[in-house]
Image: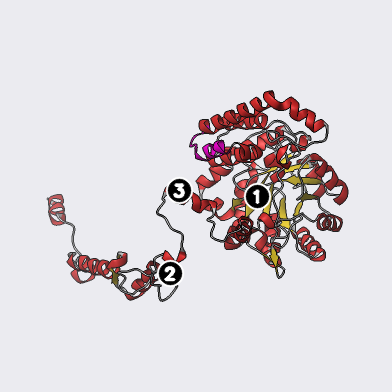
């Protein structure tokens, strides 16, 4: 069959999908996708996969895609991060038979993407992106799509989208935030950027950002003219978002855990989903929050979820009538929430307070936490946990041991290194000079001497050219007996 493109691909292969679950690392696994599809999602993406690892590691392919093939899980788009055209296409060729399209991640703003040189940190390298999309469009039997973040300038964002369309992108998802907008500094997404892109390209566009309920979905489609709306954080806190419902948390938690029984996934994924679903309730029941963090089995996680359910239902039977009457009179539930804490509802990420910017530059997350707590000496939550496990542990930089540095790279040098270098630099130098370093366990010289000694001890075979031709043993006797 000829490969479908653009609007034909969106309407026929994707069924004109308008409600889309975003690619989420360790969160949009098969079990969660199936739960979301049951509650109104029409298209799902896999978590972001690393193209290079996908090509070289058969187990990675099996665990992240091949074992998750399920007839109910379609249409499906597989997303890769990559920065090399050949590697991207190799990975896509291995995945194309298990999905309906291949997506290139150009939107991840995290530090790991900066170190790995992928995601939103490729958005200035237009030549590279053109080659990646063009090659994938030529080689794949399924369409190639892209998920991007915007530039601060609308006109540059539009030119960026048009470049990707010209290279062969058949569907574009636009997250209306820049790569600098993340964490507590996320801020609102710009639908104006998305609207401008939609008007400028002739391929389907999905919008991403500011989606917390079904009304947001409808308003976004109306205001921007996009073909569909993608949700990430809103979906994690309420998988029934696309149905326009806000059910009790335990209804969806129980359903998700039942799906996980049939389609297992790593325990860390399940725990993270339960933390999101029960987020507001766990602020009330802090002890159960600690238990959920510590349990090591799926049964243990399910037991904590059941206990949360029982406590919420007890609250319902005890004082619900009073709370309901108050809400009818116009009072909101305690905590500033739109619904009671046991109801699935949006999570609004707290933004930086007024005055949290100095000279126009955003402060770090750590600086914001320190200012909020009123002290720069307060330890982070991770350090507090480490100190609970080891009360004698100190985090005072002045008390940390001082290490002598390697003369070549600045890493700590080995105390017994004969070259006074770190292990990596020592290995290079010892290899070049064929020397030993007992301190690092490197024995290039010793191994070479042993190899030469072994070769010298081997018996030498005679040179066939000097020895001359040899007659086969017993040949004269055989000839003589034949003549007789």
- Using the image, determine if residue 246 lies above or below residue 149: above
**Which x, y percent locates residue 397?**
46, 65
Circle 3 Cα neighbour tier, 10 Å, few/some/many (<14 / 14–19 / ≥20): few
Kindly identify which residue carries mark 3: 388
- Is 389 situated left or right of 127 in this image? left
- Identify the element where label 2 is drawn: loop
Is 350 covered by the magenta stretch? no
- Using the image, determine if residue 460 lies above or below residue 28: below
Give the magenta-colored segment's residue range: 286-298
Kindly identify which residue carries mark 2: 411
Q: CA distance from mark 3 to mark 2?
A: 30 Å
- Is 424 situated left or right of 167 in this image? left
- Using the image, determine if residue 141 lies above or below residue 152: above
Kindly identify which residue carries mark 1: 79
**Which x, y percent locates residue 483?**
14, 52
Q: Quadrant of residue 63?
A: top right
For marks 1 and 3, the one nearer the N-term is 1
- Using the image, determine if residue 466 lies above or below residue 477: below
At x 25%, y 68%, the residue is 446
- Identify the element where label 1 is drawn: strand
């Amino acid at each position: 069959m000829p490969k479908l493109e653009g609007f034909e691909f969106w309407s026929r292969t994707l069924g004109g999908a308008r409600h889309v679950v975003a690619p989420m690392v360790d969160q949009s696994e098969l079990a969660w996708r199936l739960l979301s599809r049951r509650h109104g999602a029409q298209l799902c993406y896999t978590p972001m996969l690393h193209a290079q690892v996908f090509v070289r590691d058969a187990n990675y392919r099996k665990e992240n895609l091949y074992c998750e093939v399920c007839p109910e899980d379609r249409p499906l788009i597989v997303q890769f991060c990559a920065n090399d055209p050949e590697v991207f296409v190799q990975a896509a060729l291995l995945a194309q038979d298990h999905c309906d399209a291949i997506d290139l991640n150009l939107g991840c703003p995290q530090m790991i993407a900066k170190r790995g040189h992928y995601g939103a940190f490729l958005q200035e390298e237009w030549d590279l992106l053109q080659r990646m999309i063009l090659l994938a469009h030529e080689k794949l039997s399924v369409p190639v799509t892209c998920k991007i973040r915007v530039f601060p300038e609308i006109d540059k964002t539009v030119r960026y989208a048009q470049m990707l369309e010209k290279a062969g992108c058949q569907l574009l998802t636009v997250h209306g935030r820049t790569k600098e907008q993340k964490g507590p500094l996320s801020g609102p997404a710009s639908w104006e950027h998305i609207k401008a892109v939609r008007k400028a390209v002739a391929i389907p566009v999905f919008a991403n950002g500011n989606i917390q309920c079904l009304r947001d979905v409808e308003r976004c489609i109306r205001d921007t003219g996009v073909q569909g709306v993608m949700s990430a954080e809103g979906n994690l806190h309420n998988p029934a978002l696309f149905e326009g419902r806000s059910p009790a948390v335990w209804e969806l938690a129980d359903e998700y855990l039942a799906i996980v029984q049939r389609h297992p996934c790593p325990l860390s994924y399940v725990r993270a989903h339960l933390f999101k679903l029960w987020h507001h309730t766990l602020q009330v029941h802090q002890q159960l929050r600690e238990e959920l963090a510590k349990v090591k089995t799926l049964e243990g996680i399910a037991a904590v979820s059941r206990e949360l359910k029982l406590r919420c239902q007890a609250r319902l039977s005890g004082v619900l009538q009073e709370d309901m009457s108050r809400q009818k009179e116009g009072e909101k539930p305690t905590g500033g929430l739109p619904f009671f804490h046991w109801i699935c509802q949006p999570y609004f990420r707290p933004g930086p307070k007024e005055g949290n910017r100095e000279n126009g530059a955003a402060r770090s997350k750590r600086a914001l936490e320190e200012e909020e707590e009123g002290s720069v000496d307060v330890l982070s939550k991770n350090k507090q946990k480490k100190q609970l496990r080891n009360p004698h542990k100190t985090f005072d930089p002045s008390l940390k041991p001082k290490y002598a540095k390697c003369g070549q790279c600045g890493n700590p040098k080995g105390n017994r290194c004969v070259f006074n270098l770190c292990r990596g630099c020592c290995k290079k130098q010892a290899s070049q000079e064929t020397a030993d370093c007992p301190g690092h366990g490197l024995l290039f010289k010793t191994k070479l001497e042993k190899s030469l000694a072994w070769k010298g001890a081997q018996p030498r075979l005679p040179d066939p050219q000097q020895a001359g031709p040899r007659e086969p043993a017993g040949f004269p006797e055989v000839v003589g007996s034949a003549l007789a």
